[in-house]
Amino acid sequence: MKTDDNELIQQRKKKIQDMRAEGMTLYAYRFDPEHAARQLHEAYGTASAEALAEQKPVVTLAGRVIALRRFGKAAFAHIQDATGKIQVFAARDILSEEDFRLFRRVDIGDFIGVRGPLFRTRTAELTIEIQSLQLLTKSLRPLPEKWHGLRDKEIRYRQRYLDLVVNPQVKDTFAVRSRIIAALRAFMNQRGFLEVETPMMQPIPGGATARPFRTHHNALAMDLFLRIAPELYLKRLLVGGFERVYELNRNFRNEGMDLEHNPEFTMMEFYMAYADYTDLMALTEELLSQVTQDVRGSLKLEFKGHAINMTPPYQRIPYTEAIAAALNEKGYDGKTLEDRDALKKAAAALEIPVSPKASRSKLLDKLFEVLVESKLIQPTFVTDYPTELSPLSKRKRDNPDLVERFELFIAGKEIANAFSELNDPEDQRGRFEQQVAERNSGDEEAMYMDHDFVRALEYGMPPAAGEGIGVDRLVMLLTGNESIRDVILFPQMRPESTDR
């Protein structure tokens, strides 16, 4: 990558050389800030200039200089810490000669520590009068010229550290993300679920239909896969005697990237013995409504111009009925669903690309993705999927061609996927064999055979239900961000151009 040094950086390098030659410490070891910007605004934000002049509260604060205005023998600056920003004032007749000389060398982007009394300026702004100053870190690169001016999304994602400095709302998004994850954990812990950790490198990728990333372990001389889901390991724990387990986990899928997909993403997956998918619908309603209320203070939110109400109960609609209704709007009758050739013709007429070898179930899945998903705005459980699309789900009690499964959609996005878990080892073996046949026919997302998992089921797994919730998409929904990259601190990016 070519150097991007410019004149400003060269000037700062020269300044650093001069300051070092004078024996100045440019990169401090520590500082003890006793106060934070938000704390000061909350405590003194309504105090009058007269009250501050009388009290003269002395504060100590550290942060990054984000604005600077010099006036000969005095200067105003804004410094920003993790909680917000506050103005500081430096004057030659207040600071020592050494500290004032140091302040004159301060640039936007530097970290400084200040100590002094609070006062209110003529414009009524709460301000720290600097009586002592310490340079904590000298910034070599200048911040963008215009504050809040970092708009190039590629630069924002690639240099997230800079994005966080100049776009405070981005930092707010990730603070909310942390609160969402804490709320998810609290909910599960309060209901007797045990948080566990399962392998991120697996000899057999399982638990989802997705293309995995492959790696190699030198000491064991074997290929491994980054996990696409923790499901099969979590269900092994049900076999072992744990009855309620969950994992907040990172998953990796070697597939396309768009507004809703990143190759590395976060899910919460949990399993509950002696329950079925109807139990998880009720639990999911309770979970999402509580997390929404905890984080947002309301069950109503706006997303992409839609008013969404997270108040239970959520709508329920069978999978095939949803597709039939969508096709009926396009002029097709219900018989189309039963015939593979009719589905292929409908897809072609609607200009929906499908594989020539696609089975009836795969055709249904593509039609659902294109015609139905985007219309599911209010929280909606789509239930009872074809068995072929759900190789780990228990068959529906009154229809073996379907499984007891639901996906929850909100604002046109899949937020959760759950089902009554298949615990019949022979049925599971047959489903794996069907997946292997599809993989051998060219489906790179079909599952591998996992003999050890079948062996585990042969020891007996209690009836159970399991669910995965897309944490990134939930954060998108609750923060109003339309791209998954806006809720992942360091999304995957192409390598930087060598011309930059």
Image: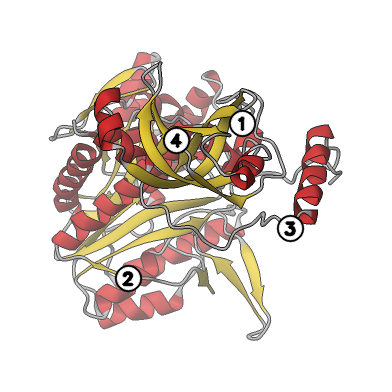
Measure how far apart labels 1 and 2 are at the Cα level: 36 Å
Measure how far apart labels 4 and 3 are at the Cα level: 26 Å
Measure how far apart labels 3 and 1 are at the Cα level: 40 Å
Percent across and percent down for residue 337 are 37, 31
Query: Of the residues tagged 1 and 4, which is closer to the observer?
Result: 4
Q: Report if the CB atoms under discs 4 and 2 are less than 8 Å apart.
A: no
Nearer-the-camera pick, 295 or 465: 295
Q: Which label was assigned to residue 196?
A: 2
* Quarter occupied by residue 425: bottom left
Q: Secondary structure at mark 4?
A: strand
- Give the residue number, with chain letter if any, for mark 4: 129
Percent across and percent down for residue 432 are 44, 65
> Which residue is at the far front?
93
Q: Is residue 258 visible?
A: no
Q: Residues within 10 Å of mark 1 (few under 14, many from 20)?
A: few
Q: Which label was assigned to residue 23?
A: 3
Q: Amino acid at mark 3?
A: Gly
Q: Report if the CB atoms under discs 1 and 4 are less than 8 Å apart.
A: no
Image position of 458 with respect to 243: above or below:
below
Measure how far apart labels 4 and 2 are at the Cα level: 51 Å
